[in-house]
Image (tube, rainbow, N blue to C red):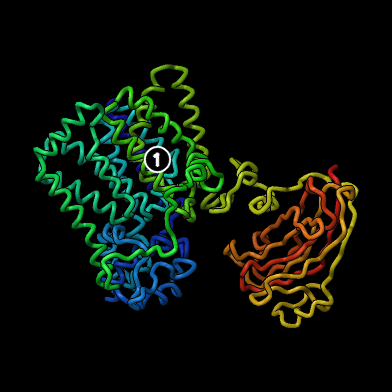
Amino acid sequence: MKNHLSLYAWLFASAFLLAVNLFYYPKWKLPGTEATISWDVSGYYFYLPAIFIYKDLKKVGFLETIHQQYQPAGSPYQAFQHESGNFVMKYSAGMAVQYLPFFLTAHALAAPLGYPADGFSRPYQVAISLGSILVAILGLWFMRRILSTYFEDKIVAATLLIIALATNYLDYSAINGAMTHNYLFTLYALLIWATIQFYERPGYVKALAIGLLIGLAALTRPTEAIACIIPLLWGVGTNWQAKERLSFFVRHWKKLAVAAFACAAVGSIQLLYWKYVSGDWVVYSYQDQGFSWLKPHIRNGLFSYRAGWLMYTPVMVFALLGFITLIRIQRPLFWATFSFSLLFIYIAFAWDIWWYGGSLGQRSMVQAYAVLAFPLASFVDWAGRRAWTAYTFAVLCLFFTYANLWWTHQAHRGGLFASEQMNRPYFQRVFLRYHVPDDVRKLLDTNELFEGERKNVKLVKEENFESDSTAYNCPLPPIEGQHSLCLDAERQYSPPVEAPLSPTDGQWVRAEATFRCQFKEWNFWQMTQFIVRFVNGQEVVKERAIRVYRFLDSGEDKRLYIDSAFPDQAFDKVAVFFWNADGGKPIAVDELKIEVFEEQ
């Protein structure tokens, strides 16, 4: 049995991923932006219906119709109009190439099964979803194969389970597996396997495979061109080995040329596409998005509460520590894995949108786990050699696994993970809990939340907005009386409601008002804000705000409040106002009260 532990680990991990995909969160049968083919995935995928169904790769005229019918994203951002007048896909074509067999299968079955053969109906969603989970299972299989070359079976088994259960690989294989990261993980595992095979017995077919894999990875995400580090440095741990490798390259230069040609041939797919649709060989399709090469966001990318890699996947600290043991125990593996990982982290966090949209932790790191598995396995090997380190390591891994399962649940069904919005106060307040008071969501906007008993409560200002004439133009009826304050696309700010205040008047301010909306605003950047500001003369001393639509649903009236502690600096008044945050949905506000109080 001991010789098959890694096989059992692979079977368990594969079954677990499949169960999550089919039963826990089946994106393939969810609508709109929760569907498998939605958001970025729809952008990767649009090449296929454009070519095979609509025969419209230049104008992508079906884009608006698909968005209206299936609503795969908030807006049709997946393509932009080039100066040539044609539309260019934002994302490169690598994922479309990898989706192709699943797409063709769905397209052949859609009409016979009674579904529209339009590229987005149920068969296409199922095919891409199940195809992606098969890619994940294949990736774990080859991960087992390559790790088994260097480590004992039990070490391989533990490493597989850690990656599959204790990291965000779980989310980006079992649930969001149609994104690039799952596919790239498998490409990296295949690349390492092909590299090992090539150096054991060099051949043209193996060289061709290496070139095709690097080319496909770069076609998927251009920055993955750094994958060439792996075959170049694999097995080089000493100066003598470096010289031997150079000699090897000289002897086998024709095979290297085959690999380079294959890589360039795959990459030319994108160049040919750009030339066809725009007339230019190279188009920067990300437009205003780019890199800060001189100021990469390393600290935020690793440690921020918003989306820090090691905050949400802390088990990978062991992979980083594993480089220390790897250079001692498996030096020939060190330079390839360390150089790649260092450059990968630098590139990933040089990207200005370093939190990578709706990412659980750092999705940008997931594909690198195929390489980081080697230092991780090395650390597992080291930890298992002594009883006390083995038990300590096992307990920590179990805890990190539970935390990862909890985060994954909260990101999809639990609701406590707030993508792109996480911060330290909210993180600490919800971590490992399943139920928290609704008011805790205020911590996503402010770092202050009063949860005690109030004393010495004093009313300092009331406003019923009866003199506000904007109510006549508001599509919402007044909340109370004849008029309510109304904000919409044209009126973004309310006038401030001010009251004199000094530091001796109390410890906290509470502003409370009733809100009414017609339709809920889901884009948190455009949610109406309820703002409290402390002012000294003309100087703003302190400001706190909450987003109203976090608590307000369509057609609902709701009374909400925001608390803010007195600042340490001097102030002479408090001002309360409302901002529609560049949103267009009308919202009514009424019965504002401003109170001061002390802690019980």
**Which residue occupies 83% across, 79% down?**
482
Height in image: 80 above or below 370? below
Q: Is residue 141 visible?
A: yes
- Is residue 194 placed above or below 278 in the rendered structure? above
Q: Is residue 322 left or right of residue 47?
A: right
Whether residue 60 is visible to the viewer of this picture, yes or no, is: no
Q: Nearer the viewer, residue 274 or 518?
A: 274
Q: Which residue is mark 1?
A: 164
- Above or below — where is 277 with respect to 211? below
**Residue 516: x percent and y percent?**
72, 70
- In the image: residue 396, left or right of residue 379: right
> Image quarter for residue 305?
top right
Q: Nearer the viewer, residue 571 or 210?
A: 571
Q: Quadrant of residue 252?
A: top left
The quadrant of the rendering that contains the C terminus is: top right
Quadrant showing the N terminus: top left
The x, y position of residue 500, in whole percent, is: 87, 59
The residue closer to the viewer here, 175 or 349, is 349
